[in-house]
Image: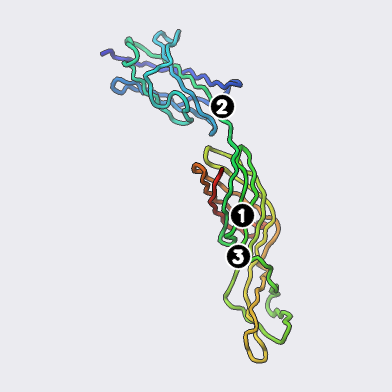
Amino acid sequence: MVKIVFRYIFVLIVLLLSKGLIYSQSITNINSSNENNSIVIAYKISGAKFNQKFNVSIYYSINDGETFIGPLKAVRGNVGEGVLGGNNVIIWDVFSEINIPKGDIIFDIKVNVIEEEIQKKFYILYTGSIDAPFGLSVGQFGKIGWYISARTSMMISEPTYSYGGAGWSPNFEEPSYYTFNNLEKIRRFSLTIGANKQISRNFFISAGIGYGLKDLVWQMNIYSYSNDDLINSEYVKNPDYSYKGIEAETGLTYRLKNFLITSGVSTVNFQYTNLLIGLGYSF
């Protein structure tokens, strides 16, 4: 058996695109080893964008790089069409392809960059929070996309009364008094528009702004002065813990095929904040 001696491996990277050269990618962490009758070449494509794939071919020289032979055919692993960025390995079954003499081998790895067009896809998402569990977002993904979102709580109507603090005396239609029971609710609504950006093959970030409100609502029981009978129950807004104005939000969405999982955070006037979750579908 012919023993192959490796003193060094020289790798020449040619990054080509049909519209010109691309310099943002590089080949790093290159090393090689002998495994039985095969040569294993490990390399890393750094700086690759999420929408880039690579056509990788490998050549060899046994005359100090004066001429190269190839591309090699008896190779497997991360070689050929559709190679992704990151750590990659090429395995060359050297003796099934050539009768190589003893000496140094110089490799020339050529990488042809294929930049895929980022597809625009519409999507629909259920989005909600503990305080506003009913929500819907519709939008479009792309390199830069858009969305519109609305969320609400079960309680939609504005409370009849607004609490005025200790000693507060509402104007009832008939002589009566009130007591607060233990029922407490949140009245919540938001309407936002925003933009999203694809940051990797399956992750998107988003940010939006719009109008929102959050009311802390108590329930009071109203009783008749004459016989202490319960007349009615009404909702009372506590203005000290109620906010309305600018709604701002941000989030992160993960795409698994066409299914979407999202999480985020929203705030009203930067005084009230809650977490958002959502599930959806892109098409």
Q: Residues within 10 Å of mark 3 (few under 14, many from 20)?
A: some
- Which quadrant does the C terminus fall into? top right
Image location (x, y in percent) of residue 45: 48, 27
Left or right side of 22 for 34: left
Place residue 117 in its image quadrant. top right
**Image colouring:** rainbow
Residue type at mark 3? Met
Image location (x, y in percent) of residue 244: 69, 61
Asked if the residue at tag 3 contacts the one at tag 2, i.e. Cβ–Cβ closer than 8 Å, the answer is no
Q: Residues within 10 Å of mark 1 (few under 14, many from 20)?
A: many
Q: Which residue is drawn at 62% across and 73% down?
A: 218
Place residue 106 in its image quadrant. top left
- Which quadrant does the N terminus fall into? top left
Secondary-structure class at tag 3: loop
Residue matched to label 3: 154
Out of 107 and 256, give the one closest to the viewer.
256
Q: Nearer the viewer, mark 1 or mark 3?
A: 3
Instruction: Give the mark nearest the N terminus, 1 or 3.
Output: 3
Relative to 223, say whether 283 is above or below.
above
Residue matched to label 2: 24
Q: Residue at x 69, y 75 (%)?
A: 165
Left or right side of 81 for 227: right
Residue type at mark 2? Ser
Relative to 162, say whether 244 is above or below.
above
Out of 87 and 133, give the one closest to the viewer.
133
Calculate the distance from the C-alpha at mark 2 to the C-alpha at mark 1: 36 Å
Q: Which residue is drawn at 72% across and 85% down?
A: 174
Instruction: Give the mark nearest the N terminus, 2 or 1.
Output: 2
Out of 42 and 145, give the one closest to the viewer.
145
Residue matched to label 1: 266
Residue type at mark 1? Ser
Image location (x, y in percent) of residue 9: 41, 17
